[in-house]
Image (cartoon, helix red, strand yellow):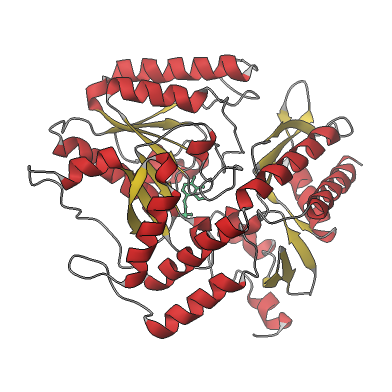
């Protein structure tokens, strides 16, 4: 490794960082992380921090999982790559497909299409949804519906169903035929409705109205995150996703559960769809499938959708899509070890318990800190705090204050994620009660500093 002077001098000079302004990063360079251990990261100055962000929602098992690392090293030695395009496969892809079928059996999903990451997985589910209807002779079903504030990655189809303005405008025009309905966020919504159950009904009515307006026979699928992550941890009322399922069924529309964040335990259940008691037609996953140690993902397919493809007699079921690294043997080996570890450590149970502790702790801080406008979470280890400078007007806290909060928590030894006026927490799912107390203390201290 080059020394700290070299790294600091060249930081953000020759690399453009995703989700950032290239010019601004030259002025305020990113933190340089050079090591990690357990649930902690270590920066270039040797400062250790509890990683409240969990990498990027993917380090469910932390940074020191020995079985996954060993599986990767072993696979690199034995078979570092082979393709699974038409005509060849390898043992790891076969083994992983069996393990995933077992893992997702309660969700009714039994076939996997492997990818290189979350955006790829989303793209495949959207493509398969259109193709499914074409095979069945409903070629007119090409449109997609999704939620405002939803995040579905950055490929052009995924970006088209994204519901966040910032991720859309610079790259428009996006794909035609994508339409959005309001997200069930009780803090900010066009209905001015703060009751989550009532709001769920209003959003479902908006979905139904949009289907009527577009005409159901033009719509391929509805895609949603069971709990919206990047949009600021928006937790729908428990009636929402089952309501979406019922509407989709009634109109012949496929339901895609985008679980790039929520699959593998983050909500306190093995999948987000299961958390709400819903069986989707298609599911996208990535991130924690390898604990972030290798770029890998999967689109999971239900028995019913699979049957349409596998029993096709129309000649339209060819899967003319996929990636060089689909089913990469090293990624598949990592995923196999990761799934075993996820089960062995029973991480969903810890995510549920620690998630409640974190959520309750921040709710308690609301009495002390006027800056806390809304606390979202309480379903596993996905928590967001929306900060405001005026509670009654819900005025978003300014960027300079958000920077102070982030910097103060960093100095106190906790990495938080700032997204607009939200603080987002998605720590590893193996954190202890003491780790949660540390996160809460850092937030408490940072909010006091910003308010002073
Ligand atoms: C719900 C959801 N879908 C898709 C993606 C895109 O995944 P990736 O960044 O691996 O392409 C993300 C990334 O955070 C996500 O949260």
- Residue occupying the far left of the picture: 314
Above or below: residue 117 compared with residue 149: below
Q: Position of residue 138 (x, y in %)?
A: 16, 30
**Front position in the image: 419 or 104:** 104
- Residue occupying the far right of the picture: 452
Dividing the picture into quarters, in which one does residue 345 lie? bottom right
Q: Residue at x 49, y 75 (%)?
A: 72
Above or below: residue 77 compared with residue 320: below
Does the rendering let one see residue 421? Answer: no
Q: Is residue 24 left or right of residue 99?
A: right
Q: Position of residue 230 (x, y in %)?
A: 57, 43
Above or below: residue 310 compared with residue 199: below
Q: Residue at x 27, y 38 (%)?
A: 304
In which quadrant will I find the C terminus?
top right
Does the rendering let one see residue 22? Answer: yes
Q: Residue at x 50, y 67 (%)?
A: 337
Q: Is residue 302 left or right of residue 278?
A: left
Q: Position of residue 17 (x, y in %)?
A: 55, 62
Q: Please state the total of marks drawn on the protein image.
A: 0
Q: Position of residue 442 (x, y in %)?
A: 84, 51
In which quadrant will I find the N terminus?
bottom right
Dividing the picture into quarters, in which one does residue 161 lie? top left
Q: Residue at x 42, y 73 (%)?
A: 330
């Amino acid at each position: 490794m080059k020394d700290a002077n070299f790294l600091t001098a060249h930081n953000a000079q020759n690399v453009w960082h995703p989700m950032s302004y290239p010019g601004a990063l030259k002025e305020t360079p990113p933190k340089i992380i050079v090591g990690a251990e357990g649930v902690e990261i270590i920066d270039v100055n040797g400062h250790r921090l509890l990683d409240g962000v969990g990498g990027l929602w993917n380090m469910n098992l932390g940074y020191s999982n020995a079985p996954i690392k060993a599986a990767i090293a072993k696979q690199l030695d034995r078979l570092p790559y082979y393709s699974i395009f038409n005509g060849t496969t390898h043992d790891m892809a076969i083994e992983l497909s069996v393990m995933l079928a077992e893992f997702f059996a309660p969700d009714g999903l039994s076939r996997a299409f492997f990818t290189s990451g979350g955006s790829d997985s989303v793209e495949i589910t959207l493509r398969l949804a259109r193709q499914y209807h074409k095979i069945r002779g409903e070629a007119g079903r090409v449109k997609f519906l999704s939620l405002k504030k939803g995040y579905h990655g950055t490929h052009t189809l995924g970006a088209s169903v994204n519901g966040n303005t910032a991720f859309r405008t610079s790259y428009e025009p996006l794909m035609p035929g994508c339409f959005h309905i309001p997200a069930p966020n009780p803090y900010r919504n066009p209905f001015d409705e703060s009751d989550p159950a009532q709001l769920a009904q209003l959003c479902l009515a908006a979905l139904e109205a949009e289907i009527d307006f577009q005409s159901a026979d033009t719509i391929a699928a509805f895609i949603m995150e069971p709990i919206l992550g990047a949009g600021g941890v928006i937790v729908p009322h428990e009636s929402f996703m089952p309501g979406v399922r019922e509407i989709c069924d009634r109109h012949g529309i496929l339901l895609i559960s985008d679980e790039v964040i929520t699959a593998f335990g983050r909500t306190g259940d093995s999948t987000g769809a299961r958390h709400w008691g819903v069986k989707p037609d298609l599911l996208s996953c990535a991130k924690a499938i390898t604990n972030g140690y290798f770029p890998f993902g999967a689109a999971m397919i239900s028995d019913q959708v699979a049957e349409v493809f596998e029993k096709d007699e129309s000649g339209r079921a060819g899967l003319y899509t996929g990636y060089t690294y689909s089913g990469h043997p090293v990624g598949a080996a990592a995923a196999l070890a990761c799934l075993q570890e996820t089960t062995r450590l029973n991480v969903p149970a810890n995510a549920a318990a620690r998630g409640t502790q974190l959520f309750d702790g921040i709710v308690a801080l609301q009495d002390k800190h006027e800056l806390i406008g809304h606390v979202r979470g309480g379903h596993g280890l996905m928590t967001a705090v929306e900060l405001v400078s005026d509670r009654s007007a819900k005025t978003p806290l300014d960027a300079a204050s958000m920077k102070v909060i982030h910097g103060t928590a960093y100095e106190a030894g906790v990495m938080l994620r700032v997204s607009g006026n939200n603080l987002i927490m998605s720590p590893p799912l193996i954190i202890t009660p003491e780790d949660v107390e540390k996160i809460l203390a850092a937030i408490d201290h940072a909010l006091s500093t910003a308010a002073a």
